[in-house]
Image: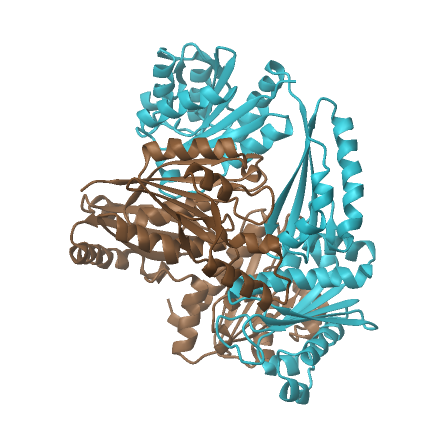
Chain colours: A brown, B cyan
Amino acid sequence: MKIIYAEVVTIGDEILYGQITDTNSKWISEELDKVGIKTIRKSSVGDQKKEILNILSESLQRADIVLITGGLGPTKDDITKKTLAEYFNDELVINPHAEEFVRGFFEKRGRPFTELNRQQAAIPSKCTYLHNATGTAPGMWFDHHGKVIVSMPGVPLEMKYLMSNEVIPRLKAKFELPEIVHKIIRTIGLGESFLAERIENWEDNLPEHIKLAYLPSFGEVKLRLTGIGENRTKVEEEIETEVLKLVPLIEEHIYSFENDEIEKSIGKILNETASTLGVAESCTGGYLAHLLTSIPGSSAYFLGGVVSYSNQAKMDVLKVKQETLTKFGAVSEQTVIEMAEGVRKVMKTTFGIATSGVAGPDGGTEEKPVGTVWLAVTDGKQTLTKKLSLGKIRIVNIEYSAKAALNFLRILTKGK
Amino acid sequence: MKIIYAEVVTIGDEILYGQITDTNSKWISEELDKVGIKTIRKSSVGDQKKEILNILSESLQRADIVLITGGLGPTKDDITKKTLAEYFNDELVINPHAEEFVRGFFEKRGRPFTELNRQQAAIPSKCTYLHNATGTAPGMWFDHHGKVIVSMPGVPLEMKYLMSNEVIPRLKAKFELPEIVHKIIRTIGLGESFLAERIENWEDNLPEHIKLAYLPSFGEVKLRLTGIGENRTKVEEEIETEVLKLVPLIEEHIYSFENDEIEKSIGKILNETASTLGVAESCTGGYLAHLLTSIPGSSAYFLGGVVSYSNQAKMDVLKVKQETLTKFGAVSEQTVIEMAEGVRKVMKTTFGIATSGVAGPDGGTEEKPVGTVWLAVTDGKQTLTKKLSLGKIRIVNIEYSAKAALNFLRILTKGK
């Protein structure tokens, strides 16, 4: 079976000047990998016609598929569209579907539909219009001597929408791709190297055509099993067999087989048990509530949170005792227990979670250095507490603590 | 003055498969930009000899400088070093300085100095050895027909050490470099296309050597002016002159000349005026508090927040009247006013911000469709409200609303 090769091209001076990190090409090549398309090169070029024309012809010599992001906004420095039209000896014409959508986009927001906005609906006449429900710049699909060139906006959200809803399905339809089956097991609370040691023997005994990848992020490690073959069902069964061998080795750290984020897994648990949750946050500063409320429908189980950044707020809203704060300090087991019990009462919920710590970079002491974080979870009968000793980077401490707190609630509900 | 061009090449299958995000090339090009070297292309290729040889010769045709990271570790898939030796018709020889350092590196850690480790000290005989104090893989500098090729390890810490201590100083010594000046003006509350129309004449009259770029993100647009010349002070003055012409055109939308995020600008305003802030969040679900508390030192002015996701919480914690919720609903001007005033009292702060809306994707009605968001800001005397009509994507509505709310507070404090 012929391997299909792809190249990813990201366009934008802001990438070349190092003012933004290109995360699009990582995401795109990961998606291509999932459907059995091999990325052989990634390139970033500036907003100059010459550069774009060069990279286009070079990439097309090497690859079957060229996916481009960036340079599709309404302003002058966005020239990808014009350059593509020139490359294919084509002209820009207003696409009626695009125009209708863009017009509605602005009308809905009560903003004037200017000529500059209307031009967002202009695309090369030879390309296939790819509908972008998330913004005003459409995607463009070009068939060219059996090869494919696709242009997408650089805004990650819009690129992802187009990739998932338009590009990947069309690529699967156009090219004969091998069956690639991915299975992701999400784990939390065990570092990559410790995880690797635990499952070493299992990993060494995986069949040739099933590969394992460790995808670590704050406090979590995703284990991705990738099987390749001609018969999808067969590969899926083979992977299931391996998963069944893996589970007993790390069961207490696995929180999802459906590639759900921990906040989504928690949501499912709370829904299934018709339970509700309230959170009291000090060091996580609202991030924990944000994770929970980023899930659609979370209002069914998440009733509210208190970001008690000051001691006054801890006392007034969460009813933490003054003497507790005086005697043990805001960052202490005693305080975080009272916060968790307090928010559970205030929000009238089944469960309460609380976080308090020194997020940093400053504010640490000998006794409580930066990275010291206390967590508490309670159901009114049982209250669990845990102390984390993290690093010095504020945002890492915030995100890690929030995820750890959610996993801590999972442990309370599951009893493991 | 001749512009010096650079290309950045990152090597590694894990980049092409989308298993890691390449952050090296962003950092490298940012450092090059600071010293007036223009990055014209970035490329990522896999750990294959053919790919590396190709990208090397291609890059050298376009650029004066080629900076390579990755593929220098001890494992077999790291072949950059051998490939470079082949490219320059050279052979690998043990460098005594490198060997001494690597030996010490392992001895210090009480680890055996194996032959595999010793080979880390082998570099092409023609290259200049660049000392890497942070790891066992040295950097390599090749002078080649007036051009420069540098190879560095892919580990960010090691690459950064070599760039800062060896590569940048040597590049400044070798090449005559121009001065490049960037000035970023952050704007909010005006879409890219509307902004472009407002400043079109100004933009068209910019001098040849000063370029404008639009860098949009949720609800914000960064305007970046880039000037190039021989005399830094002169270029800075020329850019200042242009900025002074720009400001009156969009003054009410500018929130930072220091490239601060809106949450950081707000923090500065609150610090300068010794004011404090509390936030009441419904649809933003804690994201607003998260933005504020992501800034180190924010506890000086941010006293706390309430994520009142349920009506009960709105009444119990924020003292929103039951009749207000019954008569006008949770997503209404009246409710959001009571929330803002409520949180200001509860948290005992100078200012209160409130958000309430339908974040989506579900939960919309004829009268209040998904994307309907009410904002309120108050200082106890004056209360401003605003209605947003956004789209259907939950995370966008959350992030946009939070940023808009912070800007709304800025407007209240500035009176514009």
Q: Which quadrant of the rendered structure holds the C terminus of chain B?
A: bottom right
Name the spot of residue A138 as percent of width and height, x first. 47, 54
Q: Which quadrant of the rendered structure holds the N terminus of chain B?
A: top right
Residue A365 visible, this angle: no
Q: In this view, does B30 lie to the left or right of B248?
A: left
| Quarter holding residue B179 | top right
Count of labels shown?
A: 0
Residue A105 vertical placement versus A122 (above, below): below
| Quarter holding residue A328 | bottom right
Q: Which residue is drawn at 72% across and 79% down?
A: B338
Name the spot of residue B72 as percent of width and height, x first. 40, 26
Q: Tell which of B382 and A101 is nearer to you.
A: A101
Q: Is residue A184 left or right of residue A217?
A: left
Q: In this view, does A174 lie to the left or right of A216?
A: left
Residue A391 visible, this angle: yes
Residue A400 vertical placement versus A335 (above, below): above
Q: Residue at x 46, y 58 (%)?
A: A132
